[in-house]
Every structure is written in structure tokens, then in C-alpha cells.
Image (cartoon, coloured by chain):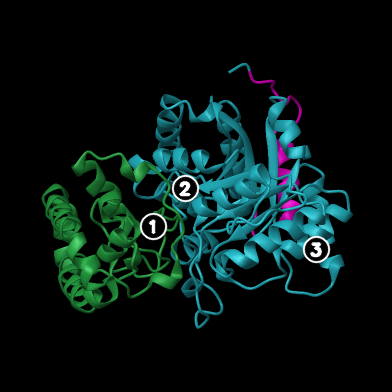
Amino acid sequence: MSRLHNVLTSGRFAITAELNPPDSADPADALDAARPLGEVADAINATDASGAHCHMSSLGISALLTRAGYDPVMQISCRDRNRIAIQGDALGAAALGVRNVLCLSGDDVSVGDHPEARRVFDLDSISLLRTLSTMRDEGRFLSGRRLTTPPQLFLGAAENPCVEPLVWRADRLGKKIEAGAQFIQTNLIFDLDRFTAFMDRIRAQGLHRRAYILAGVGLLPSVKTALWMRNRVPGIHIPDAVIARLEASDTPLEEGRRIAIEMIRSLRDMPGVSGVHVMAYRREHEVSQIVLRSGVLSRRKVRVD
Amino acid sequence: MYRLRLFATRHPRGFNRLYRTVEAGLVMLDPLLRRVGYDRAERVIRPVERGVKRLLFDCRMCGQCVLSSTGMSCPMNCPKTLRNGPCGGVRPGGFCEVKPEMRCVWVEAWEGAARMRSDAIRADLPPIDNRLWGTSSWLNVLRGRK
């Protein structure tokens, strides 16, 4: 079992963090970014060209992280690779020590830096989950050919509780769990009301007992960044009240930190939430500060649910 | 046609009944079609299917129709061609991440399924067989019944 899997099954509140992949062929760049995250996170996500912007690959970063002793969550997006490549990558990743995989449909090419590229989307996040759980549990490819050693993977998926169609996001999460999702990392949560409504539906269906839910928490260092994210990054929902709070402050970066810290504390006390996934775009050193200040590590709260 | 396909998801039960009737009709004709030969029958059936379904649902002739499971909203109109949507990029108001002026195909699908009072949308649909693009989905149903 991976370290992340261990932490979650033991009932402790888990912390995962997102590594911003470098635009570089130098492994030191990836490891430097991982260091501050490793201080506080049980697992580190290696993103797969998130926002459809090209970077060092998630497989490459994951391999570097396993060698350095971290527990990576390798993200696989369906935008760039077909089922042949994805299944091959899953075997390669497992052979390189990767134990956690996050299955995503993927941001479209049009929002990224290569909008002229061909989009693939041979699979979607749900068929990707099915594919990987089939490889792990039945020891075969989608084509039926047998694997000599199946990959042992802890499978995860994303969900976005704060965007349309709000009433069916919990049902869709149920579909992902049926397809094999064992843990969920959500998109950034800035709207506690919407997230609470989502968790109410999750608990009503008992889904929190079937998969571990980690809520996404992010740092908004300025109004300009917040507005940029709202307009350019798919799936981000930032309420006006949060923007107003940043605008009103003389020290927006510190205000942004406080917003994140308050969010972590609210989430820790919310039943059904098993951890947080912290994302600070290009500011990994902020992640450890935010997590430490929130106090969530000082008592890792054994869950009685 | 865009407006018509939105209309279809607003009245999915009627359209589904129509769809199922056509399918049942073809199943009845199966012995005849088999005698004629599916390939030969396809030459007539395919353009009819394409014309009718394109008008009503903006069908893309993927060859493996799942309209009854998606609230009569064709998933191939999704720019990501998700067979299990929606994605996490849906814009406020239920509009598409990639084509902001277009309603998200999967928001329409879940709403249509609710109107149909159908749970079929909760089952995960398998990834498509890309070899079937352009073939008649109706005939593929019959071929599969062999």
C-alpha cells in the first residue's frame, strides 16, 4: 500500500499537495519544487499538462519523486493519449514505483499553450478508471491480453463540486466510485456553501464511506491572479465575496493565505472529508506555510465515522 | 440541428419512444435484411439514419448509439466526446468549456435523463470502437444480434 493509502485507511486526515512541473529537462528543478511539499504532504501530485499547458511529464516527475523517496500521485489526462499509450504508461509507472494514479478527462487543448494540437480523448475519466482497475484486478489489457504482473495501483478521480450541474455532481462521483475510484481530489473550493451542499448529497448516498474525499484548497495571492484563474482556468469558481476580501486588504498575499488556512480548518471539521489537496500555483513554499499555520498536522484527528 | 437537439432533451420520453419504435421496426425486418445482406441494406439505411438523426439530435454517426442512456443528448457533440460526462470545466449557466456559446451536452443529458426518469445514465458507458465511425448504428444493433 502506498503511504497515501496507509494514511487514509488509518483514519488520519491526509494532506496532499500539487507540484508545478518545471519547463525543464533538469531533474533538480522537479526535486527542488518537491522539497517544501514533502515537509507537509503525505503524497505529491504530478500533474499531466494541467490547463493543457506543456511541462515535464507526470510520468517523468513521478519517477523522479519515487527515487527521492516521495509518494507521488501520477495524474493521467485523457486529452493527449489513447488507450494504448495509457495502458502502457500505467505499467511503466508501476514498474517505476508509482502507487497512486489520479484519473482525469482533462482540460481541452484550446485553453492551453498549444491550442492547435489535436485532441485525443480516446477514453474519459470513468473508462480510464475501469481500464486501470481491470488491469489491476483482472490482470489484463482492455483487449483481453493477459499481464504477467498486474500493476498495484491506488486509484483516484477528481470531481468539481462547485460548477454546473451542481445537483448531479455527487451522482457523477458515484459513477466514478463504481468504476474503481478509491479516493477523490476535488477542484479548488472557495465556496463553502456549494461544497457543503455537495457533501450533504455525498453523505446521503453513503459515498464518503466508499471513497476518501480530499477537498482542494488553493492560494489566491492577489486579485489579479484570482480574476485570471476565474477567466482562464476551466472549472474554477471563486465567489465575489472572496474577491472583495482580497480587494479590501492591504496585504492581499497574507489575506490569501488566511483564506486558505480558514478553508483547511473548516474542511477538517466537516464530516465525510478525509483530507485536503493543497494547490499553490508556482508557490510551493507557501504550501508548507499554509498547512503548518492551519494546525491540521498537530492533531491528525482519528475519524470515528 | 442545435435547437432541435435541445428540444429533444426537453421532451426525451417522446423522442425515446419514437427511437425505440424505429429500432423495433428494424428488428422485425431483420430476417428480410439478412436475406438482402446487411452491407447492401446499409447503403439505404445509413443515409436515412444520418439524415433523420442529424436533424433531430445532431448525430455524428459514431455507429454505437447510446441516446436512450443519455437523455436523448448525443455525447459525440461534446468537444471531448466524453461518453461519461460532464467534465469539470462546465461554465456558469451550464455552458461548454470549449465552446462557450454551446450548452454542455452532458448537462442536457443529465436533465433529459431526469425527465425520462431513467437511471440508465448512472451506468458507465464503455469507450467507443473507433472503427465504427460512419456506420449505421441501427444495423450494428442487428448485426450484434446474430
Mark 3 and mark 2 on one chain: yes
The crowd level at tag 1 (other Cα within 10 Å; few <14, some 14-19, many 20+) is many
Magenta stretch in the rendered image: A280-303
Mark 3 and mark 1 on one chain: no
The hue used for chain A is cyan
Q: Report the front residue among A217 and B90.
A: B90
Residue type at the position of mark 2: Asn
Please provide percent x and percent y for residue A298.
76, 27
Question: Which numbered disc flags the more N-terminal residue, 3 or 2?
Answer: 3
Calculate the distance from the C-alpha at mark 2 to the C-alpha at mark 1: 9 Å
The crowd level at tag 3 (other Cα within 10 Å; few <14, some 14-19, many 20+) is many
Report the residue at 62% width, 59% height from top.
A76
Can you identify the residue that label 3 sits on? A30
Magenta segment includes A282: yes
Instruction: Give the secondary structure at mark 3.
Output: helix
Q: Are marks 2 and 1 in contact (CB under 8 Å)?
A: yes
Residue type at the position of mark 1: Val
Calculate the distance from the C-alpha at mark 3 to the C-alpha at mark 1: 31 Å
Please report, as a chain letter, where disc 3 is located. Answer: A
